[in-house]
Amino acid sequence: MDLSAELRDRRKAANRTIASVAVDAGLSVPYIANLENGRGNPTVAALDRLATALGAQLQLTIVDEAPVKSLLPSNAADLLAESPRARGVIAELAGARGTTKRSIERQLTTTLDALGGLLPDEPTLADLDRLLDLLLLSHRP
């Protein structure tokens, strides 16, 4: 996970300035700006305060081993990158759900990877379009 991009994306998705987040988190503007630019080593307490100020919850996980990767490489990220339609749907879903585009992309990648185990072949752009249709139908009135 790219912490700096996640913080920046969440702040922008909430239509907030660094200054307003700094006030709510009790942190300095330069400190948050540095974190958003990939500089600095935040404490867990500072990250927790930032998450709260951004309407999120900090979750930390310590694992013993790296997760087992699939024997076949995933093409889900490539499909998302190839699809101009996916960009628009991702932006729409992120806005409607009050989350980041990066979060929606991760969820779509995970879903496409899961579908790969159910389909006879790797997911295609057509499969991605069907999934996007389903998501749009479920979120629009």
Image (cartoon, helix red, strand yellow):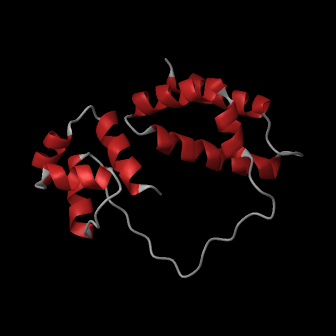
Query: Would you place residue 108 above or below residue 37 in this image?
Result: above
Residue 33 picture location, percent across and down: 24, 49
Residue 91 picture location, percent across and down: 48, 28
Q: How many marks?
A: 0
Q: Nearer the viewer, residue 42 or 120?
A: 42
Which residue sits furthest top? 141
Q: Is residue 52 visible?
A: no
Q: Is residue 122 left or right of residue 79?
A: right
Query: Would you place residue 10 above or below residue 47 in this image?
Result: above
Q: Is residue 71 left or right of residue 8?
A: right
Q: Nearer the viewer, residue 80 or 137?
A: 80
What residue is drawn where x is 56% and y is 45%?
A: 107
Q: Is residue 139 visible?
A: yes
Q: Is residue 111 left or right of residue 120?
A: left
Q: Quadrant of residue 68?
A: bottom right
Residue 78 picture location, percent across and down: 70, 42
What residue is drawn where x is 23% and y is 35%?
A: 16
Query: Would you place residue 136 above or below residue 52 in this image?
Result: above
Q: Nearer the viewer, residue 49 or 27?
A: 27
Residue 128 picture location, percent across and down: 71, 33
Q: Quadrant of residue 18?
A: top left
What residue is drawn where x is 40% and y is 48%?
A: 5
Q: Is residue 118 left or right of residue 129?
A: right
Which residue sits furthest bottom? 64
What residue is drawn where x is 29% and y is 55%?
A: 35
